[in-house]
Amino acid sequence: MKTVSTARAHGGTQGVYAHESTATGTTMTFSVFVPPLEPGRRAPILWYLSGLTCTHANVTDKGEFRAACAEHGIAFVAPDTSPRGADVPDDPDGAWDFGLGAGFYVDATEEPWAKHYRMRSYVEDELPALIAAGFPMLDGARQAITGHSMGGHGALTIGLRNPDRFRSVSAFAPIVAPSQVPWGEKALGGYLGDDRSAWRGADAVALIEDGARIGEILIDQGDADDFLSDQLRPELLAKACADAGIDCTLRMQPGYDHSYHFISTFLPDHIRWHAARLR
């Protein structure tokens, strides 16, 4: 692991790091905020998964999370959204919703994506092991996960697949049912092939329908989001959770859109919500 940069912030340390990933076969970059800690104390971890076109830098630079993380003693880890490099394939038409920056947190099985686009293995297995080895001041027994848009999809699906690892799960404007919306159909079809049964493990609503369970979910969604009705459809998650007996709090926020102005407004509240469950 190589340290790209570190800076003092709110009494803690904001770092950016890079390493050679075996999951993706590329150099991967991620950020970690370590809050101020008393001697002998370890910080629980909140994972944040970013959305389409983003890298680790979007939330690191614009998320406004550090004051809340420092207050509650929570570390904040932000991975990239896809593999990157000269040999990594991209959408041949240059579309922004597939390929680079749009890994959808799945392990691709279709060519030419299968070699590098293994973001599920990277986020679920490789990066947590690297964090555990490289940051002994963080407490891997207390983890939570959140994310935005495509990253909200990632947070929900990873949380549902790993209920014993994550004490709490939340999301901002998530793609809750990628099998039922254009972004998801394009991504899952491209990465996983035409057999829709193979998509169910990468779809939060389908996972719940198939028996995945967690105790509760917190969702914030702006009602002025341009993608609300055709790509996000949070009502599908609310219904699936209601049918399954999962406590889903869906907060429609008046006037907010899909941008980091929305995320930075409510991210500190999510950190407080996770903190109460990570104690």
Image (cartoon, rainbow, N blue to C red):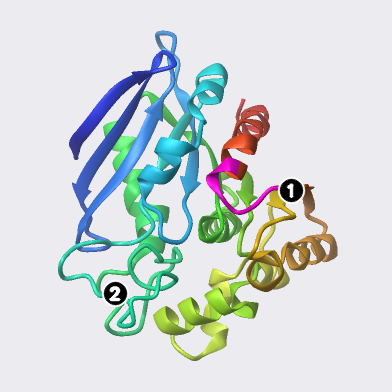
Secondary structure of the residue carrying tag 1 is loop
Which range of residues does the magenta coloring cover? 255-261
Of residues 149 and 142, the one nearer the viewer is 149
Q: Is residue 163 above or below residue 204?
A: above
Number of labels in the image equals 2
Instruction: Identify the residue under disc 2.
Output: 90
Residue 231 drawn at (x, y percent): 63, 70
Residue 258 covered by magenta stretch: yes
Circle 1 Cα neighbour tier, 10 Å, few/some/many (<14 / 14–19 / ≥20): few
Q: Which mark is residue 14?
A: none
The answer to whether residue 160 shows anywhere in this view is yes
Residue 94 drawn at (x, y percent): 33, 76
Circle 2 Cα neighbour tier, 10 Å, few/some/many (<14 / 14–19 / ≥20): some
Secondary structure of the residue carrying tag 2 is loop
Residue at the spot 48% in from the left edge and 26% down from the top edge = 66
Residue at the spot 32% in from the left edge and 44% down from the top edge = 30
Is tag 2's residue or tag 1's residue first in the polypeptide sequence? 2
Q: CA distance from mark 2 to mark 1?
A: 34 Å
The answer to whether residue 165 shows anywhere in this view is no
Residue 114 appears left or right of 151:
left
Residue 225 drawn at (x, y percent): 67, 58
Of residues 25 and 230, the one nearer the viewer is 230
Instruction: Identify the residue under disc 1.
Output: 255
Q: Is residue 178 above or below residue 8?
A: below
